[in-house]
Amino acid sequence: MIVLHTLSEYRNLRRNFSSEEQTVGFVPTMGALHEGHLSLVEQSKRENDRTVVSIFVNPLQFNNAEDYEKYPLTLKKDIQLLESVGCDILFAPSKDAMYPRPVELQMEFGAITSAMEGASRPGHFSGVGVVVSKLFNIIQPTRAYFGQKDIQQLCVIRQLVEDLNFPIQIVSCPIARNEKGLALSSRNQRLSPEGLELASQLYRTLIITAEQSTLTTPQQAISVGLQYLKNYPDIRLDYLEIVDTIQLKSLSSFTVREPFVICIAAYVEGVRLIDNLIIQA
């Protein structure tokens, strides 16, 4: 695996891909890799000639300075994991390489970011849009791979690609979970064994809420999920929402033909976790 740290290093290498007409799969990450990330890399390898992974903890998408400072940095281990699944290139730039001067650019995505993560984390999606745009321009991938756990981010990136005419196919991949259903996340590394056990109740809440969807309205289903969470007072809920899968608008009723997604965000041991469950029609 080739490890690169500067834009010029990568661009010099990328010219060879262009001359050979090779397809490039791209998996953007913030490091602290787990099996979920590796599954994206493996899918990219199946579908492209070359696979590039980036590791960059983007300060622009953190609206909580403490969360940014505590984000796990495990580059040596990450490199070993990427080599184990045959990643071709790791692009791991420094903050100065990505942002040689203060960033003034702000990006707005309209109604799609008005609720959930957008409401809870002001400025988050602007930071996501800026860094993903920069990475797309640097990497120039044929396809880019994102997990469905960050479903609002996935919708934002789809809009970004469409609005800015990036010639990139966005590939969404299923959520990777542990044996108890907990969505794999780099932030899980900050939880104690007891915290990991408690955090699995987020997925259980999604299941219980989904079970109500054939019997009740969205708000009634949410109420059942909220009632279940009262059994776990150490979980501090941010939101539990039922929304459509396109614009992520809150549903007032369930329809027979339309899929929907149940989204949750909560704090366990001070660590903010998100998860969701897509229900097909």
Image (tube, grey):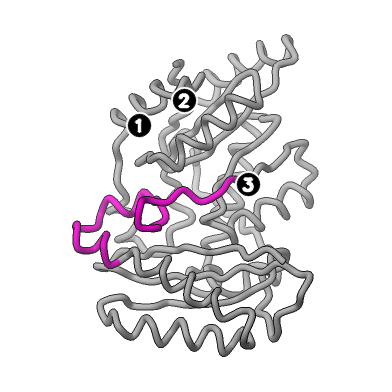
Nearer the observer: mark 1 or 3; the answer is 3
- Mark 1 to mark 2 CA distance (whole Å): 10 Å
Residue type at the position of mark 2: Leu
Circle 2 SS class: strand
What amino acid is found at the position of numbered circle 1 in the picture?
Asp
Assign a secondary structure to mark 1.
Answer: helix
The residue identified by callout 2 is 90
Q: Which residue is mark 1?
A: 78
Q: Residue at x 47, y 41 (%)?
A: 29
Residues tagged 1 and 2 counted as in contact (Cβ below 8 A): yes
In this rendering, is residue 226 above or below 156? below
Q: What segment carries the magenta color? A: 172-198
**Within the image, what quadrant is residue 134 found in?**
top right
Q: Who is closer to the viewer here, 204 or 135?
A: 204
Which quarter of the figure is the N terminus placed in?
top left
> Residue placed at 63% from the left, 65% from the top?
279
Per the model, the C-alpha gap separating discs 3 and 2 is 21 Å
- CA gap, disc 1 and disc 3: 22 Å
In x, y percent, where is residue 187? 34, 54
Crowd class of label 2 (few under 14; some 14 to 19; many from 20; radius 10 Å): many
Q: Is residue 196 magenta?
A: yes
Q: Which residue is mark 3?
A: 172
Image-based side of 191 in relation to 236, left or right = left
Judge left or right: residue 72 versus residue 263. left
